[in-house]
Image (cartoon, coloured by chain):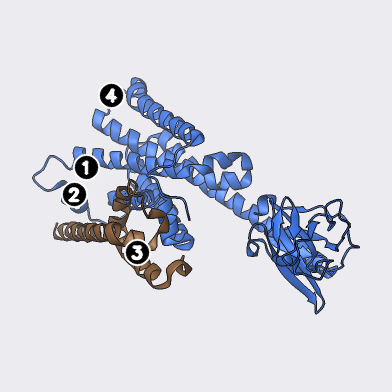
Chain colours: A brown, B blue
Amino acid sequence: MQTAELLLELGRWYLMAGGVVAAAFLVFGIDRVEPSARGSYAFRPLLIPGICLIWPLVLYRWFTLEKHGEDAR
Amino acid sequence: MSVQYTPVIWNRNKIFYDAVLLIAVVLYLYIYIRVAPGFEDVTKPIDGAILRMRAFGSCAFLMLTVILCIGPLARLDRRFLPLLYNRRHFGVMTAGIAAVHANYVLTWYYNFSPTDKYVALLSSNTNYGQILGFPFETLGIVALLILFVLAATSHDFWLSFLGAPIWKALHMFIYAAYACVVLHVALGALQGAGDPIFTSVVAASVVLVSGLHFATGRMEARRDRGEETAKASLQEKGWLVAGELDEIDDDCAKVVTLSDDERVAIFKYDGKLSAITNACAHQNGPLGEGKVLWGCITCPWHGYQYNLSDGRAPAPFTEKISTYRLKLIGSTILLDPNALPPGTHVDPVEIGEAA
């Protein structure tokens, strides 16, 4: 029981952290690293579940693209 | 990428594809839930919630099977390619159907106790050390999480943002999801009362998915071996490996140096390849740096033009330059270094499938 509760709590915190990353990325980051997203807003809510699920990878790519630009693609 | 993103790109073909898919899913669920119970053993009636749970679960399993078969089928026979073009929508729908299955499980088996249903799901059976009675639900949870990640990252944005290698590696987890689903079914549903139809369907799915991947792997290995033999044989005859197809941009050339005073420009244009000498007949201008228009190359120095297939200037001009023979083996371009007399016609190499 305790392990299950701990796992669920970890999952909850992971998704909440993902929500924070999603907000930051969709408001500030996406326009800086993804030229095709500039001026395009309707599709952004679709990205929220993905960012919440793989936010460590999103942070890594955001950082890499900021640092190395298009060469990182 | 210069095109702005939209939530979902639909065209006529995709709408048709999605409509057929949706109709097939609805039909399957209708037959499973409404028609099939009419043929069940009346001494062992199945509860409505369990029936719906099984209907959605088996539907997701079959959809996953089809998704995994589309790739190898399209490689074995190009007529299956249309199925490949909209596979992402198929995947998203599969994740949705699997989620409905999971919701039925949660609300039926774990909803009637004071314990939180998610806690109950994870803690009611923790006998991971045994085969019979293995907590197969965990395998279903892992598969569902993978399907969620794949569905959530199926938009074009993710391919561009993550880069093709990472995106592809991430989406290869579909095989892990399938393995988890097969084990989820084998250790769960198949352990109960014998259901020969469902057992056969699961076995057929595993045989089909593995068989198609094995057949495709063998076919590609055989083709690769054939290409290597063809390449080696041409090289023995003096042909040179000039480079790979993806090294040349459309309407551009790759210049290959044969000797100090002999350079060949290999052009990619209109889905074809042609090779001519790099030196313009007028003042030796670098033709490889010129622009291709209507199958003609224009010298960047003084604007002299030559037809790429025969090295002749369009009428009424009479200049001629040497042409070269090319072959495309897989994606490797091979060049016959012996220049043909100026103005000799050489059929351009069609890029076709190799592109």
Q: Looking at numbered disc 4 in the image, what kind of residue is underneath it? A: Thr
Q: Callout 1: helix, strand or loop?
A: helix
Q: Callout 3: helix, strand or loop?
A: helix
Q: Residue at x 53, y 40 (%)?
A: B83
Query: What's the chain of the residue with tag 2?
Result: B
Asked whether the viewer can see residue B207, the reply is no
Work out whether mark 2 precedes mark 4 in sequence or the reverse, and give the earlier one.
4
Please tell me whether mark 3 or mark 1 is closer to you in this view: 3
Co-location on one chain, circles 1 and 2: yes
Co-location on one chain, circles 3 and 1: no
Q: Looking at numbered disc 2 in the image, what kind of residue is underneath it? A: Tyr
Please tell me whether mark 4 or mark 1 is closer to you in this view: 1
Q: Looking at numbered disc 1 in the image, what kind of residue is underneath it? A: Leu
Circles 3 and 1: CB distance less than 8 Å?
no
Check residue A57 in the rendering and tell me which mark sits there, or answer none.
Answer: 3
Co-location on one chain, circles 3 and 2: no
Q: CA distance from mark 2 to mark 4?
A: 33 Å
Q: Residue at x 64, y 65 (%)?
A: B247
Mark 2 = which residue? B118
B170 vs B319, nearest the viewer = B319
Query: What's the chain of the residue with tag 3?
Result: A
Work out whether mark 1 precedes mark 2 in sequence or the reverse, and give the earlier one.
1
Circles 4 and 3: CB distance less than 8 Å?
no
Q: Is residue A70 left or right of residue B33?
A: right
Specify few, some or many for label 2: CA neighbours under 10 Å numbering under 14, 14-19, or 20 or more: some
Circles 1 and 2: CB distance less than 8 Å?
yes
Please tell me whether mark 3 or mark 2 is closer to you in this view: 3
- Relative image position of residue B85 (x, y in whole percent): 52, 43
Check residue A23 in the rendering and tell me which mark sits there, or answer none.
Answer: none
Q: Is residue B202 left or right of residue B225?
A: left
Asked whether the viewer can see residue B237, the reply is yes
- Relative image position of residue B242 (x, y in whole percent): 73, 68
